[in-house]
Amino acid sequence: MSQSNSFGSDPMAWFKARQRQVLIVGGSVVAVGLLGGLLWWTQVNKEAAASDALEQARNAIDGSVPLGQSAGALQRIIDSYNGTDAAEEAVVTLAQVRMVNGQNQLAATALEEFIHSGPRAKYLAPAHGLLAGAEEGLGKWAEAAQNYVTASQSADLDVLKASYLVNAARCFQLAGDKEKSLETLRSVAKDYSKTPAASEAIVRLAEATKGVEPRAH
């Protein structure tokens, strides 16, 4: 290789020979960086706007705004700010509003779609728990029981895990699966003994077994 083509022997000659290539690569790097920054800033603004809209919708609900208006405000957040944390929270909030007003089928359908969409992990437990509640309202006891179990598995606090399981046990009983109900209550009494739900589980066990359980160890 000649010295004129060697970077080590003549850096300026190397740069001049490749100036266009260097500028193109450098420009691409800058452009990618600017685009990434723009997308990040846009997402930050979108999240902030969605959060503000959700807060306003909640305040309206607390102020006893009619169902139609409350549901409409929440639905607009879901549609306009898709992908944001606030939009996912709005789905859960809208389901609660619908259930309070007896619209269990609407709530259940929306929650099923929400769960299948792969939401953030922190919304899985409340979504499954609410879906179970909506299914209870529809008399779907077996489905409700399973969703309460899934909600328990998704929850990050023992007090919530235990509470969901107590609800699951009730639904298993209503679905005619007594043994599964007892098994679930035993699990709460044993695995979550330090939670308030454990006391309820023990009482229900005693009632269901006519005092045979819980047995002394």
Image (cartoon, helix red, strand yellow):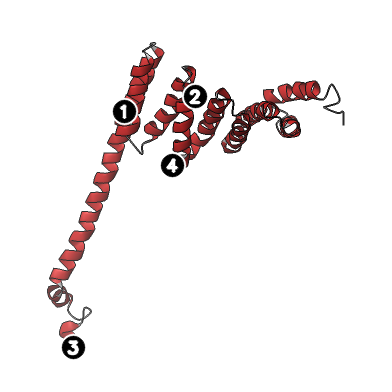
- The residue identified by callout 4 is 117
x then y, percent, for residue 189:
74, 29
Q: Taking 58 as reference, is 14 above or below it?
A: below
Mark 3 → mark 4, Cα distance in angstroms: 61 Å
Q: How crowded is mark 4: few (under 14 residues within 10 Å), some or many (20 or more)?
A: few
Q: Examine the image and state in which quarter residue 118 appears.
A: top left
In the image: residue 135, left or right of residue 55: right
- The residue identified by callout 3 is 2
Give amino acid for label 4. Answer: Ser
- The residue identified by callout 2 is 104
Q: Examine the image and state in which quarter residue 148 appears.
A: top right
First along the sequence among labels 1 and 3: 3
First along the sequence among labels 2 and 3: 3
First along the sequence among labels 4 and 2: 2
x then y, percent, for residue 144:
59, 31
Question: Which of the numbered marks, if any, corresponds to residue 185?
Answer: none
Question: Which of the numbered marks, if any, corresponds to residue 76?
Answer: 1
x then y, percent, for residue 164:
62, 29
In the image: residue 181, left or right of residue 147: right
Give amino acid for label 3. Answer: Ser
